[in-house]
Amino acid sequence: MSLISLFTVFLKIGAFSFGGGYAAMPLIKEQVITLHDWLTMSSFTDLVTIAEMTPGPIAVNAATFIGNQVAGIPGAIAATIGVILPSCFFVTILAFLYTRYRRLTLIQGILQSLRPAVVAMIFSAGLSILVPVIFRDGIISADIHNIELRSLFLFVSALVLLRTQKNLNPIIIMVGCGVVELMCQIIQGLSI
């Protein structure tokens, strides 16, 4: 594995993932699973969970994790620099242009039109993570044997809690789901 290859992959991801870390997830998935075969889908799902739970931007956390998995500490450094470099460049240019031309109707129109695309990318990222967790073969189907019922229950429970309990910290829900899953695994191990 070449550090240059790792750097350029994450440079592309950093340059073309508009809308934040969740919007970058489909690009990261495409690069690290489909094109380069650096991670499995199961490892990628774990990566998203870890990147979400750790402090910092999710795309940077993901890049650091993948770089470390692929090429150790030098890989983590190369991937992290690759993913943040385009942002540093673009933000510097955009900050200058925005402060200079922010009152133009054209600029306001461009910003307004980007919002639906960002929402679509975030939805796509969430769906690409949810489907392999809920469906055993990674394909949406009505076959009850293909559905991971415990994962579906945890997902629905977490979603209901997040939507109904506005003051509930999402980290508490994540830890709670992890504890429930751990308890289920222990009970399942004892019954075997």
Image (tube, rainbow, N blue to C red):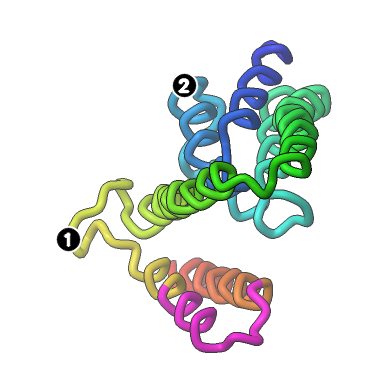
Kindly identify the amino acid type of the residue bearing the numbered disc 2: Leu
When the figure is inspected, residue 145 is found, relative to residue 103, above or below; the finding is below
Kindly identify the amino acid type of the residue bearing the numbered disc 1: Ala
State which quarter of the image contains the C terminus: bottom left
Q: Is residue 80 visible?
A: no
State which quarter of the image contains the N terminus: top right
When the figure is inspected, residue 128 is found, relative to residue 150, above or below; the finding is above
Residue 63: percent from left, percent from top: 69, 35
Looking at the rendering, which quadrant does residue 9 occupy? top right
The residue indicated by pointer 2 is 35
Residue 62: percent from left, percent from top: 66, 41
Region in magenta:
156-170
Residue 71: percent from left, percent from top: 73, 22
The mark found on residue 18 in the picture is none
Mark whose residue sits in front, 1 or 2: 2
When the figure is inspected, residue 83 is found, relative to residue 156, above or below; the finding is above
